[in-house]
């Protein structure tokens, strides 16, 4: 399995869930100019290939780091925290999700705008609680000492996985909304 490139190192930025968006964009544009193929048209074939790889790395890095969900998945992936078989979530959360899914199944058979709104409100409340709980961890991650980062990353992983569950429920709700 190829190593995951270190986009933060490539951009000379610290690993963080809250990068300076303006600095990220400046770095992307500066490297886009530096690695533009037109400026290397007279270089050797090897050099042109290297420039092309760097240009691709720059694009991939920017796409990943500029999108909060992709950035979170990227950081967790670099630390080996999104591998299969590691997806255990707290039973109380799984029970809540199961309850929401049962309500969705009932809506399949008996569409009911009020029940739909209730499920949506529950999902939003759960989501807001999750966001509020993880915010200090995301904001403070960069300043944490190295030995406490693994614990913070575990919290972020749990948050990320919970958000994926809620996203699937939102997608189901959107399908109901589209039908009515």
Image (cartoon, rainbow, N blue to C red):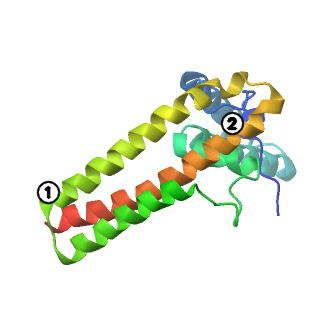
Residue annotated with mark 1 = 114
In the picture, measured across the screen, residue 125 lies left or right of residue 51, that is left
Earlier in the chain: of badge 1 and badge 2, it is 1
Which is more toward the observer, 168 or 63? 168
Q: Where is residue 60 in the image (x, y as percent from the top left)?
A: 64, 47
The kind of secondary structure element at disc 1 is helix
User: Which residue occupies 75% across, 48% down?
Assistant: 78
The quadrant of the rendering that contains the N terminus is: bottom right
- Asked if 163 appears above or below 9 in the picture, the reply is below
Judge left or right: residue 113 versus residue 140: left
**Residue beneath disc 2:** 152
Q: Which of 43 and 85 is in front in this view?
A: 85
Tell how many labels: 2
Residue 98, picture quadrant: bottom left
The residue positioned 76% from the left and 39% from the top of the image is 150
Find residue 113 and report its horizontal and vertical position in percent.
Answer: 13, 60
SS class of the residue under badge 2?
A: helix
Calculate the distance from the C-alpha at mark 1 to the C-alpha at mark 2. 38 Å
């Amino acid at each position: 399995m190829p190593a995951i490139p270190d986009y933060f190192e490539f951009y000379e930025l610290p690993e963080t869930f809250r990068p300076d968006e303006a600095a990220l964009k400046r770095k992307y544009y500066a490297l886009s100019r530096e690695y533009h193929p037109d400026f290397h048209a007279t270089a050797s074939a090897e050099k042109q290939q290297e420039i092309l790889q760097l240009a691709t790395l720059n694009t991939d890095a920017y796409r990943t780091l500029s999108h909060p969900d992709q950035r979170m998945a990227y950081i967790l992936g670099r630390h080996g925290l999104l591998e299969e078989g590691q997806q255990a979530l707290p039973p109380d959360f799984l029970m809540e999700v199961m309850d929401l899914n049962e309500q969705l199944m009932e809506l399949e058979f008996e569409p009911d705008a009020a029940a739909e709104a209730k499920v949506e409100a529950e999902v939003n409340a759960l989501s807001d609680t999750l966001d509020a709980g993880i915010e200090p961890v995301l904001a403070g991650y960069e300043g944490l000492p190295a030995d406490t980062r693994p614990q913070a990353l575990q919290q972020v992983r749990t948050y990320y996985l919970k958000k994926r569950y809620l996203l699937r429920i939102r997608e189901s709700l959107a399908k109901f909304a589209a039908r009515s």
